[in-house]
Image (cartoon, coloured by chain):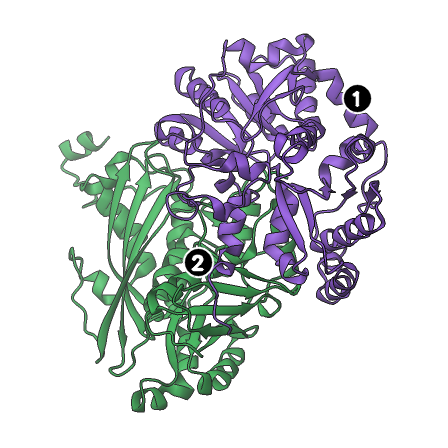
Amino acid sequence: MTAMDDARGKPVKAGYVRPLDFKHGRVDMTHGGGGRAMKQLIEQLFAVAFDNEFLAQGNDMARVPLPPGRVVMATDSHVITPLFFPGGDIGSLSVHGTVNDVAMAGAAPVYLAAGFILEEGFPLDRLRRIVESMARAAREANVAIVTGDTKVVEQGKGDGVFITTTGIGVVEDGIDIGGARARPGDAILLSGFVGDHGMTIMSTRESLAFGADLQSDTAALHGLVAAMLAPVRDAMLADPARGLHALRDPTRGGLATLLNEIAGQSGVGMLIEEAAIPVRPQVEAACEFLGLDPLYVANEGKLVAFVAPQDAEVVLAAMRAHPLGANAARIGTVTADPHHFVQMATRFGGRRVVDWLTGEQLPRIC
Amino acid sequence: MKYIDEFRDGDLARGIAARIAAEVRPDRRYHFMEFCGGHTHAISRYGVADLLPPQIRLIHGPGCPVCVLPIGRIDLAIRLVLEHQVTLATYGDCLRVPASDGLSLLKAKARGARIAMIYSAADALELARRQPAGQVVFFAIGFETTTPPTALVIRQAAAERIANFSVICNHVLTPSAITSILESPEVRSFGTVPLDGFIGPAHVSTVIGSAPYEHFAQEYAKPVVIAGFEPLDVMQAILMLVRQVNEGRAEVENEFTRAVTRDGNLKAQALVSEVFELRRSFEWRGLGEVPYSALAIRAEYAAFDAERRFALETKKVADNKACECGAILRGVKHPRDCRIFGTVCTPENPVGSCMVSSEGACAAHYTYGRFREIAAPAA
C-alpha cells in the first residue's frame, strides 16, 4: 500500500531495504550485477563479518600501512568438494592456504584480499557459514581481509563457491628463506602427521564412508614459523648459512611432491627414512584400503623445514614446543645428487625412489 | 595396522634374506617370474630386491590388467562414450591408458565424454540406478579377482530389470596367460628366457584356488609358490622357490595359506560361470591373441552386454613400433632395454601400457628403481 501512503503524504521509510533472507534465500544473478542487491550482500554479509577499518572505507581497493621489511605476496584459489568437512570448510581453508604460503618466506602475514565466485542458486545460509568461518580464521591468524570482489555465475557453471585469496606479509631484512636454498647436509624436519587433510576429504566424499574420527589439519602456520625462527634469527642475520634455509607446506601432492620440488629447485638429492615419517594409523589404514600412498596425500596444516645441521636440534625443539608442531620429527637429510633423486630407506630394509606424482593419485585395481 | 604391519617387518625380512643368501648356490642363477602386478608393486615399493642376493633375478610378468589391455578395447570404449552419449564408469587405473589418435579416456573426458571414476562394480550399478534417464556402461577389467563382483552386478541388474545398465567385459584369465608364456618360443625352444619358477598370484588364487597351477608344475616342470602381496610374503615365496629348485622339485606350494585353499572360492566360481562364458580368443597386449583367455557375457544376460546393445566392434590396433611392452610383458626384455624408456615414454606421457599403471613393469621401474641404473651417491 505504499502508493496510497504516498498519496496521503505519509513518506515511505527512507532507504528501507528488505534484509537478506539468510534462512531460505539463495544467490541469484543480481548479487553479482553491480546493483543494489550486490551492495546489500557486501554490506550485510562481508562487511559485517570481516569488519575492519580498511574495508569500512568502502573503496574498490584498500590503502594500508605496512611494518618495515620486504613485502611477501602469495595467491591461492580454493575449489574444494565438499565445501564443509570435519575440521574446517572452504572459508577457513582459503585463509590458511594463503597465510601459509606467505609464512613460508618466514614472513608475518598482515592483510588478505578475497575474491568470490558464487554459483547462482547457492543457499545464502551456507554462504554465511563460509564467510563467518573465514572471518574467524582471519581473526585467529591476526590478518585483516581488507578488500574483495564478488561475481556470480549461472547455475551449472560453478561448483557452489570458489574463493581466491591473496595475502600480503612482511619479512625482516636479512632473513632469506626459499626453495632454492636447501644444501647437502641440511636436516629435513616435518611438523607432524601427514595425510590427514586429504584422507578426511576423500572419506567425506559420498561413497567412501570410513575414518569417522579423522579430521582435516587445516591451520595457519605463521605462529609455528615465528617460533622456529626465534632461536636462530640472530645466527641467520650474522651468517646466511645458518638456521632455516627453506620452508614449504606439503599441500596438493603431499610430502613426496614437496621434496621433489625442493630437490629440483635447490639442485640437491634427499634421503628420507620411512620409519621416521609420522602417519596416523587411521590414515595409513585408509590409504591401504584405497591403494594410495600417504606420502602423496594433501595436508593443510603441516610444513617441512630444511635446516642447517648445527641448528637442527634447536629448531626441532622449538617446533615440538608449539602446539602445531608437537609431533614434529627429523625425517631425513639433504644429499648431494646431480640427478636430484629423493630416495627413501624403507621400513622393510630396502631403498627406493620417491618420485613425482603422475597425474592424479588414482586407486589401484589389484 | 594390526595384521598388516606384521607382514612388513624389517627384522623378519632380514632373517629371511639371510636364509635365502645362505641357501642359493653361488654357481647358478635363479629366474623367477612374479605374475601379478600386485607383487611387482610390493617388490618395488618396499625395495625387496635390495634384500636379495645377486643370483636371484625377478622377472615382471603380465599380471597387470591395465597393462595387457589392447589399445583396440580402449578405442572401443572411447568411441562408445563419444558417439552414444552414455556415461562410462570405470576404475581409475584405466583412465590414462593411451589409445589411438593421442586419446585416452581422461582426454576424452576433457572433450566432453561422460566418464565416472568408480571404486567398485557396485558403484557403477548405483550410478545407473541414480540416473535412470541415461545409459551407464561399466568398463569391466581385471583378472579373476574382479570378475565375481562384475558377475554379481549383472545378475543384480537383471533381477531389478535395470534397463539403462550394461557392461563391456574385458575380464581375462590367469592360467591361460601363464600357459601362453610357457608355450612361447623364447621359453620353449630358444631358451632365451630362462624361467625357473613362478610366484603365483595372491588375490586371484583366493578365487580360483591353487589347483589350476598344478598343471604347470607337472607339465612344464616349473615350481609355483602362491604368495600374498605383502613384502614378507614375497620374500618367503622366493625362499620356497629357491629350495624347490635346489632340490629339483616342481610343485605347487602355498605360502598364502591364510587366504588361499586348493579349491578356492566355489561360490564365486559358480557365480562367474553363471554369468560368463569363455571367449574363443582374446587379444592381450604383448602376448597377442591368446585362445580361451578371457570371458564374455552369456546369452542369458545378453541384454546387459554393451558390445551387443551398442553393436560395438573391436578394431585391432598395432602397438607403437618403438615400444617394447610386448617383450617386457613376456620377460624377454627389461624396461631399461627399451630405447624410449624414460625419454619419450614416461609416466606423464606413456607410450606403452607398462608405463601406465603403477603395477606396470616400466612404471614401477621408473618410479621406484631407476636410480639403480645411475650409481647414486651414498648419503
| Above/below status of A46 relative to A258 | above
Image point (70%, 65%), residue name: B10
Q: Nearer the viewer, residue A13 or B318?
A: B318
Distance, label 2 to label 1, CA atoms, is: 46 Å
Kindly indicate whether the residue at mark 1 contacts the one at mark 2 (C-beta within 8 angstroms): no
Read off the chain for label 1.
Answer: B
Residue where numbered disc 2 is placed:
A257
Type of residue at label 2?
A: Thr
> What color does chain B have in the rendering?
purple
Does A286 sit left or right of A99 as displayed?
right
Indicate whether A339 appears above or below A114: below
Q: Position of residue A151 (x, y in %)?
A: 25, 43
Q: Quadrant of residue A108?
A: bottom left
Residue on which disc 1 sits: B270
Q: Quadrant of residue B222?
A: top right
- Left or right? Give the position of B84 relative to B305: left
Q: Are marks 2 and 1 on the same chain?
A: no
x%, y% of residue B286?
Answer: 54, 31
Question: In this rendering, does residue B183 appear at all?
Answer: yes
- Mark 1 is surrounded, within 10 Å at the Cα level, by few (under 14), some (14 to 19) or many (20 or more) other residues, namely few
